[in-house]
Image (cartoon, grey):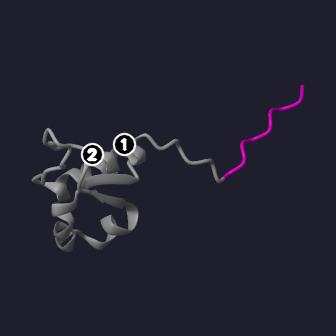
Amino acid sequence: MTGEITLTGQVLPIGGLKEKALAAQRAGVKTVLAPKPNEPDLEDFPPHLLRELEFVFVSHIDQVLPVALEPEKKRTRPRPKAAAG
């Protein structure tokens, strides 16, 4: 997440959301937190980006921390068993 918050915790809009989302996708990020006022920017996004990233739009810092600090999701594939030897 990039951007600014006010002293009262309000999340302010950012510029270049599409470019930042593309960079996040290239880095392997799956969830992007963005300011609520930037939600209309999604209209300009390529469809593949909207399919591959989850966008969470927030208006207050209290909404950011639970998502940003969320524990990593459990693996869907089982771990390989150690070789017996």
User: Who's the residue at 13% across and 51% down the image?
Assistant: 12
User: In the figure, 32 relative to 9: above or below?
Assistant: below
Residue position marked by numbered label 2 in the rendering = 61
Disc 1 on helix, strand or loop? helix
User: Who's the residue at 38% across and 48% down the image?
Assistant: 29
User: Who's the residue at 62% across and 47% down the image?
Assistant: 74
Q: Does the magenta stretch include residue 81?
A: yes
Q: Residues within 10 Å of mark 1 (few under 14, many from 20)?
A: few
User: In the figure, 57 relative to 8: above or below?
Assistant: below
Discs 1, 2 touching: Cβ within 8 Å: yes
Image disc number at residue 5: none
Q: How crowded is mark 2: few (under 14 residues within 10 Å), some or many (20 or more)?
A: some
Extreme residue toward the top, this view: 85
Disc 2 on helix, strand or loop? helix
Amino acid carrying mark 1 in the image = Leu
Amino acid carrying mark 2 in the image = Ile
Residue 35 position, x and y percent, is 21, 55
Residue position marked by numbered label 1 in the rendering = 65
Q: Quadrant of the N terminus?
A: top left
Q: How far apart are marks 1 and 2 (CA)?
A: 7 Å
Q: Does the magenta stretch include residue 49?
A: no
The magenta segment is: 77-85
